Amino acid sequence: MTRQPFIVDFLQNDKGGKVFISILLVLMLVVPALNLLVPADSFFHIPTYTVTLLGKYLSYAMLAIALDLVWGYCGILSLGHAAFFALGGYAMGMYLMRQIGDRGVYGNAELPDFMVFLNWTELPWYWQGFDMFWFAMIMVVLVPGLLALVFGWLAFRARVTGVYLSIITQALTYALLLAFFMNELGFGGNNGLTDFKDILGYDLQADTTRASLFFLSALFLIITYFLCRFIITSKLGRVVVAIRDAEDRTRFIGYKVESFKLWIFVLSAMIAGVAGALFVPQVGIINPGEFSPLNSIELVVWVAIGGRATLYGAALGAVIVNYSKSYLTAAFPEIWLFALGGLFLLVTIFMPKGIIGLWNQMRLKLQEKKQLTTENKIE
Amino acid sequence: MSGLDNIREMMRRDKVFDFVEQKRLPFTGRRVVIPGEIDATHGPILYLENISVSFDGFKALNDLTLYINDGELRCIIGPNGAGKTTMMDVITGKTRPDSGSAYFGQTMDLTRMSEYEIAHAGIGRKFQKPTIFPQHTIFENLELAMAADKHVWPTLFAKINAEQYERINEVANTIGLTDLLYETAAQLSHGQKQWLEIGMLLMQNPRVLLVDEPVAGMTHQEMDKTAELLKSLAGKHSVVVVEHDMDFVRSIASTVTVLHEGSVLAEGTMDEVQNNPKVIEVYLGE
């Protein structure tokens, strides 16, 4: 066994991964170029609106990969993963709020508008430090990670599994939804955080900033993919799949199952947090709606449609569902939810392994056919 | 040795002090019992004493006392509901006894250890239903079971070295699955799955193997092979086999323990046990 360069080693037996990374690399360079360098009246020009939309899809794709890590590989069906995404988003939103400074409606250099509106006179302690970008970025991973740590520690140690775990994750995100709706909590209540002006001094409305955010989304998606791929191809990855398939067996050959579940759950929550932080500056708002239990369920649908336990399948599912969502909500706003439900039903009945699974199946069949025909010729 | 050599000897980093290594106290020569180390010097390796377990009023184990000697091959038989599986659950930490004590060697209190700690200490268990990792290859199944640092971070960066590779192949050979090493375990036949699970136990280098119904669903040939395998393991390991198939038990066991209603009814060689009137009564009714 010789040592090979990092990336070659990784993608060697990962055909889908190669395609996935290649597409992302192309997008990462071509989309911003077509947006910034090609004149607006040209056929090849990509409008900034589309760039932002694509960036949004990529952050969803990252969230889907995070869920695939815990659900597809470890069998933990978290129905509250959007909560970690939203928390990361809020951490980023708080930084962006502090960046507004005295350009708000009330012109208060220290307090965001909604706090002035509530007659608050000073910044709550938990808003301290969010004027610094590095601090906010640490919080983007730390806050979802800590919540996952505490929640997971309690749940996994008590050996809560299966449907029960799904239900309490759902309860978790619902509790957060209700909490963030309260004005007194200090996160803008119903309206959430919005009216952002700039990030690191760059205007959020500028084309260049938008293109850079897209570039970063693609970059972080690639990094996430490599990180997850490294994990699932390691021995730890095999342990995690073993836990999914035969939890007791794993325990009796000497693995502390709780620790492994907790580790992967916390990591997944952190990735979801980063995805949320990439999502917020592109969308321009974060509000309690992101904690809605429905979001987390939709997220599960993305992963199921794309194909579980493949990573890129989850990303593909996220993009496909969200693209059709953008299209259908505009064209047929009434039927969107039915379409999503129908899609989920069709997938679970006819393609239990999702689009990627179907693709693999078809490829196998084609190969068999080819083999048969060549065999016939020989005969 | 000169004084300098003595000092050098003391400073060597790859070695602990002699008197610790020998595990004997100076002058008296008494053994030092180190916590966490298996001490089977008195003969038995497993001590189950006065163990009772009840589920909702049903006494699964009733004042069970049982000793397993180091290196012994012991068969445990008994009608359904005699408490065989519950006994294994107590030994492996899955079930906590209501009363009584369970010791591994003289030092390790099994009733206060969790499942993974017990597995680390050296007790391996095969389930009644063959339980393997279906999506993994045979090689990976064995790799996962292999004795190693099984904490999270070391597992993340674990790499197989040549010695471990060798060991996996050796065990695969023992259980007759060398040809299928890179096939997924889901494709194995029932008997092969049973063997794979035994192989996974072997990878853990356990002192005690608890084997629950190893020949259920096996053909006669497979049964003979399994008997050979288990017999060859005894001596190096203590093997406790729970089995219903009397022919199989007769073919492997030197000592048989009969459980009935949660406690030991009889113990002895197969012939002694079979001629025991109490055993006959339990198995054949009044």
Image: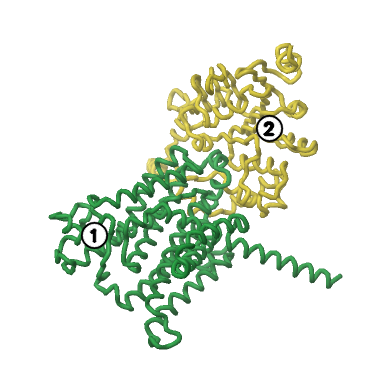
Chain colours: A green, B yellow
Indicate the secondary structure of the residue bearing disc 1: loop
Gap between marks 1 and 2 measured at Cα: 62 Å
Q: Chain of mark 1?
A: A
Q: Is residue A217 above or below residue B167?
A: below
Relative to residue A249, is residue A227 depicted above or below? below
In the image, farthest residue toward the left: A121
Q: Quadrant of the N terminus of chain B?
A: top left
- The chain letter under disc 2 is B
Residue sitting at 51 percent across and 66 percent down?
Answer: A320
Task: Residue B205: give x, y in percent of width and height.
Answer: 59, 39
**Which of the pair A97/B31 is nearer the observer?**
A97
The amino acid on which the numbered mark 1 sits, given as a three-letter code, is Phe
At x 58%, y 29%, the residue is B88
Q: Position of residue A279 (x, y in %)?
A: 37, 65
The count of marks equals 2
User: Of the residues tagged 1 and 2, which is closer to the observer?
Assistant: 1
**Residue B9 position in % (x across, y down):** 42, 42
Q: Which mark is residue B213?
A: 2
Q: Which mark is residue A4?
A: none
- Comparing A333 with A182, the one in front is A333
Q: Residues within 10 Å of mark 1 (few under 14, many from 20)?
A: many
The amino acid type of the residue labelled 2 equals: Glu
> Same chain for the residues at labels 1 and 2, yes or no?
no
Q: Quadrant of the C terminus of chain B?
A: top right
Q: Give the residue number, with chain letter if any, for mark 1.
A: A130
Q: Is A12 above or below relative to B217?
A: below
Is A25 left, or right, of B82 in this rendering? left
